[in-house]
Image: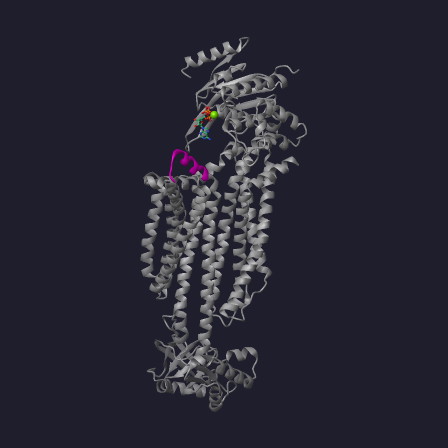
Amino acid sequence: MELIKILFKMIRYHRKDYMLYLYCNIFTMALLLAFLSVCSNHSLMHNYQVDPMIADNILFPSLMVCLFTLLFLPYAYEAFLKGRKQEYSVLMTLGMTEREVIANMFLECFAVSSAGCIMGLVCGSGLSVLFFLFLRRIIGITPIQWEFHARAYLAAVGLYALVIILILLLNIIRILKANLSELLQAKWKEERKQKGSKALLFLGCAVFLVSILSMLYVFYSGKTNFWLLSMGSFLMGTFLAIFHSDSVLYKNSSRKWKISFGLLLQNLKSWKIVTIISSCLFGLIVFFSGLCFTIYSYSMHNAIAYSPYDLFYVRDQNSNQMELEELEQILNRHGISLVSQTQVCVLRSGAFNILSADEINEKLGKDYHPCQGSFIQLFQEDLKDGYEHELLPVENVTIKLGDSKKLPLALQEQRIEILFNPCKSLADTTLIVNSDDFKRIAEQSEEYFLVNAILINLDNWKISGPAIAELQNCMAASNNFSQEAQYLSSLSSKIGTYTIEKQSSEVLIFWIFFVDLMFFGAANVTIYFKIKSELKEDTRMIYHLYRIGITEKETWNILFKKNLCYYLPSLIMGIGFGIFYCFSVNSIYHYGLMGFICAGLTAAAAVLLQFFLIFVITRYEYSEVNPFP
Amino acid sequence: MESPADILKITNLSKSYPIHKELALPVLQGIDLTIKAGELTAVMGPSGCGKTTLMNLISGVDSADSGSIMIRDTEITTMNKSQMAVFRRSHIGLIFQDFNLMESLNVKDNILLPLFLDNHSQYGEEMFQKICKILSICDITDKNITDISGGEKQRTAIARALINHPQIILADEPTGNLDAKSTKDVMEYLTDINREFQATLFMVTHDSYAASYCDKVILLKDGKVLSVLEKAQNSRKIFLEHIYEFLKQIGGE
Ligand SMILES: Nc1ncnc2c1ncn2[C@@H]1O[C@H](COP(=O)(O)OP(=O)(O)OP(=O)(O)O)[C@@H](O)[C@H]1O
Ligand SMILES: [Mg+2]
């Protein structure tokens, strides 16, 4: 009984450490759950009103959050345990058995973790509810709403439990293996055991340089896989160099920095871990925002480029049979008038759309001249739309005509031009043939059937939304199709694509904001956790210095420089990775400069915010540490 | 009364610390010692000669490379850590050079800690009062460890080592932070305890005066036992002079 009372007294004495560790757990859990909830939300991830590329951009950061959990939780536990180990080892010299120590560790870890887990789940739910509320109310995307998915909760709890159990086991094994006299000094020894070596520093620098060179070479020769490989070695080289920089930094640093470096070196191991985690987070912020802002900048342009006509649909014997007069009446009722109207014949099968060159040239003012027996393959794509394009040629097409006759066609040339709006009632590949061939196919083929593509321009497409909705309803009513068939024969309008693109962009921008905020928060929590858990030690150090004689201003400078050492390396590395990576990924799609600028701007914002935070944190630390009466 | 059998028997004890991959720093090289039950023994020697290391080995805090340590009839070098822990809390009182007190507890809890670990706090109070009086720390028992002086910490550490009547007390410079008067009090108290409970004291010290309270002084140098001075039937003063003389000869203090 007495022993339990004593243990409680110890816990009360260290309550600040416990609370700090608890907060870290809550934060991590909340972050994890919020991202997993967003990920598993059906209304967001499978929404027709939102561009599917959004889904990819949601999955990627969520994966990164899982990775963060895997790295940060063990670190937080180690830092927390570091303080406790000292006490455990004293208790062990007084005769506490290992079993008792381990039982104690287990209980403690279990208590704090389950509290952290539950509170984290509550906070995470709140966060995700807020996220969707904001999306609905402020951005105004009403079909998207918060959903409860037990899967998300299970996954979050599962991952969390797995990490906790693993680190607990690892530390128990470590205690079992350690010698008591080692444990007594663990607090100091573990941190300073690994001193940087010059050889590894140079190795790191060499790897770094070689990777950069090979990346440049590979970049211009366009081998993506190898490029990713070099990216990996580039990261490793950088980390290696940074981690062994203490071998030269401390000796050669100016006197003014020496004390700050000394404070840093006191907890070198945790500094390395923190630097890896936060530089990844900073890098992700810069890369991800740069990427998404670039996507945003061209997605609007794409909406217009891919929809050359204000209204486009396909008519055949069964669907969308509406007289032009009726169509015009409906449009007029909504105050919109029809400016031009063209009809183009399309022969389509499951695989191809075939157009007649003469008709296209005449009606759409184009210039296609396929010879008899050959075709022009048309790619209706904009090469500068920010996506990768695979222009695979169709070399030969053989069209079965009736009576077992065949019409072989060969590829004459490839053209890249957008003729029609994206439309679900047409096939993916479009071929343009000579009008004689076209006639033969139309008359004799049983595979191909003739449909009409209707191309309409309006006087003001931006307000055409309600009119087109009504048109769609009328046509659907007269079609009398099943839902799926109706979906395939639905209208395609400029305002439709534009609205989807606009909403997607808004969701994307909001998402970037959310991700950046969370990641920036996570990076700062990681570093702040370290600063805070070292506060006691630092206070002692500063007090020793104070007794030797330092001024208040010097104290401030020491702390400020120390915090710079904590934040800047990861910030600089993160920004370097982020900008570089964002530039190169966007370069593949011809938006390298844009990517560079977007990432650069995000980085600048991050630096400004971070400096402000360093200032605030130093001020807090100074007020805690300050030995001056 | 028990016969003054050997309570501690060390044979051919060696210990080295790894410095670099292949390199090791030999600290203790073949130590042989025998301590009789109830004896007061002081270990002296220049700084860094391995005194604390020897203490750590005897208390099982660190493990030896080779050799054997018998306490009573128990070989402790072959014990596992849990057995050692239980053995330590029932037989050994430890006083560390750097105290190793718990900052999170106050003086009283620190002193009573070994009893709590053994789950019998009943007979603690009386003993606690008695020890506090002798060590004159009655006034500070409610203070936090962070708020007491170096000497007070030392006395707290001594009190903690004595609270559960250990058979053997291992003390690493128990008087290192004390003034002459306190040193005298502590040494006299340790002698009293020794007489009253037949507790064996094995202590490291740099202070010849404190050493002169002992029955035997072991001189360590370069990881070996240089010589052993016995007090025998001499008075404390004469023994003190012996120690002085000997230290002078080997170029110490
Ligand atoms: N954990 C360790 N790792 C490496 N070397 C060590 C370690 N502990 C002690 N040493 C070295 O072993 C030697 C003996 O140390 P020890 O602490 O036993 O000396 P000591 O006799 O107690 O000295 P003092 O009188 O100053 O307390 C010293 O040279 C010390 O540097
Ligand atoms: Mg020592």
Segment colored magenta: A539-551
Instruction: Please name whichever residue, A92 or B173, is drawn nearer the observer in this view of the structure.
Output: B173
**Residue A308 visible from this viewpoint:** yes
Extreme top residue here? B233
Instruction: Please name whichever residue, A500 or B239, is drawn nearer the observer in this view of the structure.
Output: B239
Colour treatment of the image:
one colour
The quarter of the displayed image where residue A9 is located: top right
Q: Determine whether A201 is above or below A380 in the image.
A: above
Q: Is residue A567 magenta?
A: no
Residue at (49%, 49%) from the top-left corner?
Answer: A72
Please tell me whether the stretch drawn in magenta is mainly helix, strand or loop.
helix
Give the percent coordinates (x, y) of residue A471.
50, 84
Q: Assign the C terminus of chain B to one quadrant of the image.
A: top left
The quarter of the displayed image where residue A341 is located: bottom left
Residue at (62%, 23%) from the top-left corner?
Answer: B130
Q: Assign the N terminus of chain B to one quadrant of the image.
A: top right
Give the percent coordinates (x, y) of residue A573.
38, 52
Q: Determine whether A369 is above or below B121 in the image.
A: below
Instruction: Please name whichever residue, A333 or A228, is drawn nearer the observer in this view of the structure.
Output: A333
Give the percent coordinates (x, y) of residue A334.
48, 85
Residue at (51%, 14%) from the top-left corner?
Answer: B212
- The mark tally for this picture is 0
Q: Is residue A543 magenta?
A: yes
Extreme front residue here? A629
